[in-house]
Image (cartoon, rainbow, N blue to C red):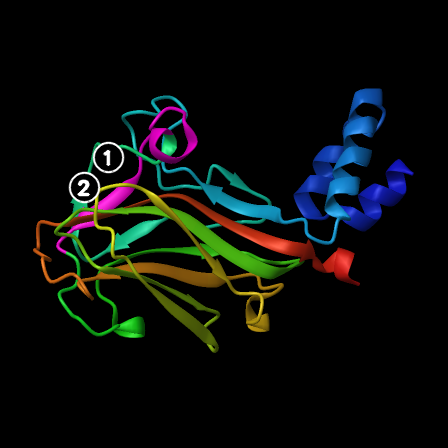
Amino acid sequence: LMTYIMNNYLTGNMKSVCSKFRHSAKFIAALILLACFAMKSNAQIPITYYDFESNAARSTTQEYTPELSVNSAGTFTQVGGTTLTSLNGAGANLYGGNSGTSIGFSNSQNVTADPTTAATTYFTTTINTSNFSGITISYDYRISATGPGNTGIIVTDGTNTVTGTFIDTAGNSTFHSLTWNLSANTFVNNKASLTVKVYFYKGVNAGFTSSGTARIDNFTVRDRKSTRLNS
């Protein structure tokens, strides 16, 4: 049973790590439990997760590399805007834990219409969805009262592109969670490299100023089921 689970429900690095502990009774029980969760039709599997904080100094030091990734994933970089440091994260605000840290910038793009692929102030990284499908991307975001009124996302494989924008009417310096469901965009499935951009712009906020801020935390890529489970 254990071999069947490993061969049919685990891929890549997960299978390699699991094979080292295959004779452990506790591991076998945990593996069976994992497979049971994975086989549920509504299960979502985390592929990549960024918490934007150093494990050594979670409350003070920002980190742009993945905290967890099943496949390879890139380092977050900022394009445009003015970098902000020492930013509280979403932990205390949304999850009742320590605040942690987030990443953010001021001086967002000063346009009212959605710039989509012409965005000039954004965070970007690359993700790998090999062996996964039904992709969703979520993150927590926080916008100040004079910050950008809109946030958007761009996902591309270099040939195909999907974009989306969200209007934020709160602007109250409180974190909110946002999820982009890309399951209808099948080109993002099972891809070794996708570029993702999270952008911010003035949009609907009439009180926008260049000193207004935007930040993100807990950027997570998930799938509905792995392609192995779908086969």
Residue 39 in the image, given as x and y percentages of width and height: 77, 48
Q: In the figure, residue 173 lies in which quadrant?
A: top left
Question: Is residue 151 at least partly visible in the picture?
Answer: yes
Characterize the local packing of mark 2: few (<14), some (14-19) or many (20 or more) Cα atoms within 10 angstroms. some
Q: Which residue is mark 2?
A: 84
Q: Which residues lie in the magenta part?
A: 92-107
Q: In the figure, residue 66 lies in which quadrant?
A: top left
Residue 149 covered by magenta stretch: no
Residue 131 in the image, given as x and y percentages of width and height: 67, 58
Helix, strand or loop at disc 2?
strand
> What residue is rendered at 44% in x and 74% in y?
161
> What residue is rendered at 92% in x and 38% in y?
1
Q: Which residue is mark 1?
A: 87
Q: Residue furthest front?
A: 169
Amino acid residing under circle 1? Leu
Question: Is residue 75 at least partly visible in the picture?
Answer: no
Asked if marks 1 and 2 touch (Cβ < 8 Å), the reply is yes
Please say if 115 is above or below 45: below
Taking the image as shown, residue 208 lies to the left or right of residue 143, namely left
Amino acid residing under circle 2? Leu
**Which quarter of the rendering shows the C terminus?**
bottom right
Residue 99 covered by magenta stretch: yes
> What residue is rendered at 13% in x and 50% in y?
212
Taking the image as shown, residue 229 lies to the left or right of residue 94, namely right
Residue 128 in the image, given as x and y percentages of width and height: 54, 56
